Amino acid sequence: MDRLLLNPYFEAYYRAIYRDRWEALRKSLLEKRASISFTQGLRVPYKLDWGSVLAAESLRFPDTGLMLDACAAPGGKSLVLAAAMGPELNLLANEPSRERRRRLLQVLEEHLDPEKRSRVAVSGFDAASLGGKKRERNRFGGILLDVPCSSERHVLGDAKALAQWTPARPRFLARRQWALLSAAFLVLQPGASLVYVTCAISEEENDGVASRLVKKYRPEVLLDEPDFPEGEKTALGRLILPDESGGIGPLYVARFRKQKSSSFNSLAYPFTRT
């Protein structure tokens, strides 16, 4: 028996979103994930999804200061960020899970040269709590927020996870994602870049969460659409799906900037990628 029959709720939920495309998309999610060996600026190559590279590279870097990778484990995106950092930039790679943080530390030690590693600190706080701490406001010159999400590729590949799935899962995760995204915006410096990333395929966790940021913090938040060509455009970002991207993804990326002042012109503000 097809294991999908064990959970008709999962099938109905995603078929309602993707309709005739769902069969091909489901099949591609069950296939082995496409990956590359990322080598730029690393001591040892690191295998990761090309979409993850695109997501990390979407962050606009400041010239100096501190950036945050808010949910950093296992560390692939932190490596991409660290490899591209100029000499006056530092990165805080944060992961609240102790077990996952151990893996993050291992990845950083193995793949970064000593100079780069000296400019990457590791922390273990709950990033959603930062927004309520006034001392943290406007602290970071760039934030990558790759949030915990439904990860449907994983669910489809795990019979137990699939059997336990309910439509409440994306709703629950979207609430957590919103708490993280809102907090990230509050601790972002004026004029700086914020990239919101998921590996989910549900609009509820993607544009649905991103739209809350636009509504709550308008006019301070400015949409800065990702400029890579892969994937398809959504209302607020880009969605890379493996059925039409050669096995890459799934990955959703939305990029924002915090307005520098009430008279800030989003087209004129200069960012420098180092």
Image: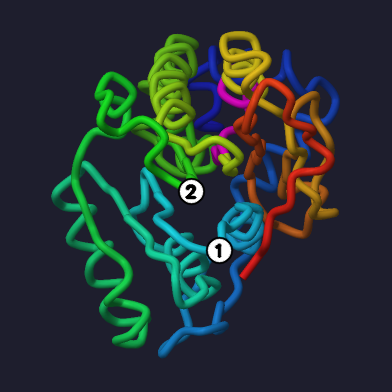
Q: Name the residue under label 1.
A: 63
Give percent across and percent down for residue 202.
62, 24
- Amino acid type, residue under disc 2 in the picture: Gly
Q: In which quarter of the image is the C terminus?
A: bottom right
Vertical order, 122 against 262 (above or below): below
Which label number is shown at residue 141?
A: 2
Which of these two is toward me, 53 or 134? 134
Compute the Cα span from label 2 to label 1: 9 Å
203 is within the stretch colored magenta? yes
Give percent across and percent down for residue 128.
32, 26
Element type at marker 2?
strand
Q: In this view, does 117 lie to the left or right of 230?
A: left
Q: In this view, does 19 lie to the left or right of 46?
A: right
Q: Are marks 2 and 1 in contact (CB under 8 Å)?
A: no
The quarter holding residue 166 reads top left
Magenta segment boundaries in residue numbering: 196-206
183 is within the stretch colored magenta? no
Which label number is shown at residue 263?
A: none
- Amino acid type, residue under disc 1 in the picture: Asp
Which of these two is toward me, 115 or 122? 115
Give percent across and percent down for residue 140.
42, 45
Element type at marker 1?
loop
Give percent across and percent down for residue 27.
69, 43
User: What residue appears at the point 53 percent right and 31 percent down from the top-left corner?
Assistant: 1
Query: Quick one: which residue is furthest to the left in this view?
Result: 98
Label 2 CA crowd tier, 10 Å (few <14, some 14–19, many 20+): many
